[in-house]
Image (tube, rainbow, N blue to C red):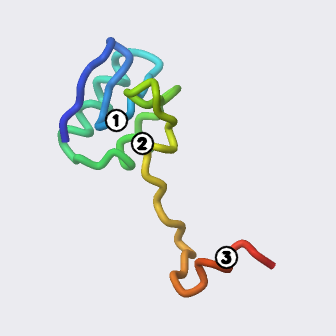
Amino acid sequence: MATVRITPNEVQVDEIIYTFADAGVADVFESCIATTGDVAHCVKDQVALHKRPADPGKLIEDVEPVPPTDNWDREEAPHQGRT
């Protein structure tokens, strides 16, 4: 997976720009992405201070996929969360 270094503390992956506390953390994050290609794993190990869409006209919800929850049931999907 390709990354783009926006600033010393910012790394873009796909459509999201991650901001880190310092360049060292950004370096480790960028290396993790290059090695594993697993953004979810790398974000857990190198916590970003902030993330934003690369396109300022979009919302983070528009560019970041929401993973399904562990208890998601396709048959119950229309009724989940209702009591």
Cα separation between marks 2 and 1: 6 Å
Q: Which is more toward the observer, 46 or 8?
A: 8
Q: State the image quarter where residue 13 is shown.
A: top left
Residue that carries the numbered disc 2 in the rendered image: 63
Kindly identify the amino acid type of the residue bearing the numbered disc 2. Answer: Val
Check disc 1 and give the amino acid type.
Glu
| Residue 47 pos. (x, y %) | 47, 34
Position of 44 with respect to 14 (left or right) is right
Circles 1 and 3, Cβ within 8 Å, touching? The answer is: no
Tell me whether circle 2 and circle 1 mark residues in contact (CB < 8 Å). yes
The residue located at (41%, 34%) in the rendering is: 46
| Quarter of the rendering occupied by the C terminus | bottom right
Residue beneath the point at 55% across and 75% down:
72
- Crowding at mark 3 (Cα within 10 Å: few <14, some 14-19, many 20+): few
Q: Secondary structure at mark 1?
A: loop
Circle nearer the N terminus (3, 2): 2
Disc 3 target residue: 80
Relative placement, left or right, of 75 versus 7 is: right
Percent coordinates x, y for residue 48 in the rendering: 47, 30
Pointer 2 local density, CA inside 10 Å: few below 14, some 14–19, many at least 20: some
Q: Is residue 54 left or right of residue 36?
A: right
Q: Amino acid at mark 3?
A: Gln
SS for callout 3: loop
> What residue would you read off at disc 1?
15
Which residue of the protein is positioned furthest toward the top in this rendering?
A: 8
Secondary structure found at label 2: helix
